[in-house]
């Protein structure tokens, strides 16, 4: 450890927070209007200056609020549009630990009215009035200590506008950051205490979660007649796991459902703090209560309500609203432990399903023995394996973010040191349980990495098998090529032999033609000399015989020369001309053309 690290002080909870301090602030938007900044309410809430419009939080929150899927005007908040939107609020006084008469579920309009009343208790106008009537006990109690908790199970634009209009100046940064991390599905678990200025504290927890829905067709039934439109959350594109359920029917293929929970406690001191919790299930499959059931729930007395944030759903972890946890750190730890536990349970269920699917896959294809069967099965195995690798990579990345977030909080020197001075049994137990849940999440991450490693090895084996198959195919192709080459060589030899035969035939024809041209004059003259009649007027002797042979021979040569010239310069399709000039090749072509059946043949 270097010298700089040694000088860092251990993280401790500041003693100022244990004392009740006067809170004199007004609504952030109202203060901006007083100084002449009359802009859009949402922009005023999100922007500290002009450069804030390029920040990720501004883009994410405004993109969520103005998305076209929510068919609401950006400044519209009315009871008719907020029938199905409910938020739970619990307002309490720490002076005598009693509950004010506003605990329950409210729509965005009523929520804004209640927050305006609470904000008035912190305003300069109320402080001035309280100083004039300080003897009134209830006024002194409200001035000393008021805290409230808000839980919005399905966040939308109307609630964001209600929070923006009523947020106090010291709450704005924390609420803005909580909204951004909730909408963007960011993971966070930390404590923030400003170094300068008036000391306040922020306890921040934000965790994404994946839930395995094994039978989505059953989950849809609760909402198939509902007209409520699901709020669209960005960055929650989920991987497809339907292919994991080997042999299942289409109606029973499992799916993943994304959910997110965010809890931020913003405190002035231990007597004046506010908790903002947001949740969503990211899917339209969740069943919802109708309006009559919701009204009946709102009519219940305070003793019949559970704490919507930290109440829990287990029999051994139920927190009633009339038995609250007053310490903000203990309340935060108990709530965080509840949701970390739920996240660990959901991941255990998901990893178990994936591991069982991998076991079924191995038993079906027996990859380690390379007994794939047909080529189609090999391609099926390869495709399944590649999809599984992509799924595991996605899940490991998601789970690693959650594990690292909790780990940074619990390590020595982390923000968990701010809670080491707590002596409450529930807080100590919550810290130990969070550490236990972290171990469970780490085990699930190791299991996913082990499965991913197995997929990588399977990919290598499949690649080797495919290379072997490709080599076998290449060898077979090479053998066929050699056979085709041998056949080509044999065909070439036959062609050469036929060429030699043709050359020999041409030679024979040439010799025969030469012989005929030599013998023809002799035969003609001999035949003439053998006749008794004298046709030509010359004597028949040896000299005239030789001269007659030479003349006929020269006449044949001249006839050949004239025929060649005529073939070159005379182009005629007349049959007599072709025969006379010796165009036998053209005569053959003409014969072939005459054999063709053309439309002109019928004319």
Image: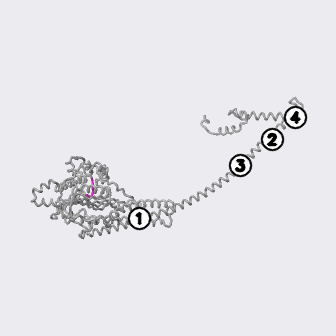
- In-image side of 359 versus 81 (left or right): right
First reached walking from the N terminus: tag 3 or tag 4:
3
Secondary element at tag 1: helix
For discs 4 and 1, the disc positioned in front in the rendered view:
1
Q: Which residue corresponds to the image point at 10% horizontal and 58% vertical from the top-left?
A: 134
The tag earlier along the polypeptide, 3 or 1, is 1
Q: Are marks 4 and 1 in contact (CB under 8 Å)?
A: no
- Name the residue tied to disc 1: 449
Image location (x, y in percent) of residue 507:
76, 44
Q: Nearer the viewer, residue 64 or 534?
A: 64
Please give the label number shown on residue 515: 2
- Picture quadrant of residue 170: bottom left
CA distance for labels 4 and 1: 114 Å
Q: Earlier in the sequence, mark 3 or mark 2?
A: 3
Mark with earlier residue (4, 1): 1
In the picture of the structure, the residue carrying the numbered disc 3 is 498
Q: Residues within 10 Å of mark 1 (few under 14, many from 20)?
A: some
- What is the magenta range? 152-156
User: Could you say where residue 585 lies in the image, as x and y percent from the top left?
Assistant: 70, 39
Q: Tell me the SS state at disc 4.
A: helix
């Amino acid at each position: 450890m270097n010298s700089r690290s040694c000088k860092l002080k251990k993280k401790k909870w500041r003693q100022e927070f244990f004392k009740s301090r006067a809170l004199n602030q007004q609504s952030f938007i109202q203060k901006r209007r007083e100084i002449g900044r009359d802009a859009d309410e949402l922009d005023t809430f999100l922007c500290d200056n002009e450069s804030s419009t390029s920040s990720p939080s501004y883009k994410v929150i405004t993109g969520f609020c103005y998305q076209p899927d929510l068919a609401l005007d950006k400044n519209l908040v009315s009871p008719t549009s907020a029938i199905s939107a409910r938020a739970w609020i619990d307002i309490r006084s720490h002076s005598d630990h009693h509950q004010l008469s506003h605990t329950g579920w409210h729509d965005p309009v009523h929520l804004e009215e209640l927050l305006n009343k609470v904000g008035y208790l912190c305003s300069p106008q109320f402080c001035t009035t309280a100083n004039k009537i300080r003897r009134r006990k209830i006024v002194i109690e409200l001035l000393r200590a008021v805290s409230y908790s808000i839980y919005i199970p399905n966040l939308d634009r109307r609630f964001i506008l209600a929070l923006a209009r009523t947020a106090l100046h010291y709450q704005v940064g924390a609420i803005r950051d909580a909204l951004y991390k909730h909408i963007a599905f960011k993971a966070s678990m930390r404590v923030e205490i400003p170094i300068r200025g008036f000391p306040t504290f922020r306890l921040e927890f934000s965790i994404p979660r994946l839930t395995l829905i094994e039978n989505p067709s059953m989950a849809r039934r609760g909402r198939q007649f509902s007209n409520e439109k699901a709020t669209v959350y960005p960055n929650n594109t989920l991987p497809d796991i339907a292919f994991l359920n080997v042999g299942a029917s289409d109606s029973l293929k499992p799916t993943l459902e994304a959910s997110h929970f965010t809890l931020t406690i913003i405190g002035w001191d231990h007597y004046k703090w506010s908790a903002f919790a947001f949740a969503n299930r990211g899917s339209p499959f969740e069943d919802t209560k109708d309006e009559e059931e919701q009204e009946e729930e709102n009519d219940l007395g305070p003793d019949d309500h559970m704490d919507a944030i930290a109440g829990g759903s287990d029999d051994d972890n139920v927190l009633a609203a009339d038995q609250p946890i007053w310490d903000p750190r203990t309340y935060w730890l108990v709530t965080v432990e509840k949701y970390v536990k739920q996240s660990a349970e959901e991941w255990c269920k998901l990893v178990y399903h994936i591991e069982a699917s991998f076991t079924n896959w191995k038993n079906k294809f027996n990859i380690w023995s390379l007994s794939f069967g047909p080529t189609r099965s090999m391609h099926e195995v390869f495709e399944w394996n590649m999809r599984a690798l992509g799924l595991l990579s996605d899940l490991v990345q998601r789970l690693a973010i959650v594990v690292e977030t909790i780990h940074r909080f619990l390590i020595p020197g982390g923000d968990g040191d701010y809670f080491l001075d707590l002596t409450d049994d529930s807080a100590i137990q919550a810290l130990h349980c969070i550490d236990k849940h972290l171990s469970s999440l780490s085990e699930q991450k190791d299991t996913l990495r082990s499965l991913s490693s197995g997929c990588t090895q399977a990919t290598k084996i499949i690649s080797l098998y495919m290379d072997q198959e490709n080599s076998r195919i290449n060898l077979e192709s090479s053998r066929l090529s050699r056979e085709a080459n041998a056949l080509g060589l044999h065909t070439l030899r036959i062609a050469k032999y036929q060429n030699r035969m043709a050359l020999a035939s041409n030679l024979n024809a040439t010799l025969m033609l030469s012989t005929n041209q030599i013998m023809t004059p002799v035969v003609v003259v001999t035949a003439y000399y053998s006749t008794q009649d004298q046709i030509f007027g010359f004597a028949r002797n040896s000299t005239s015989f030789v001269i007659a042979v030479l003349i006929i021979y020269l006449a044949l040569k001249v006839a050949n020369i004239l025929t060649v010239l005529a073939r070159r310069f005379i182009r005629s399709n007349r049959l007599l001309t072709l025969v006379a000039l010796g165009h036998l090749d053209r005569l053959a072509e003409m014969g072939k053309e005459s054999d063709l059946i053309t439309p002109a043949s019928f004319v």
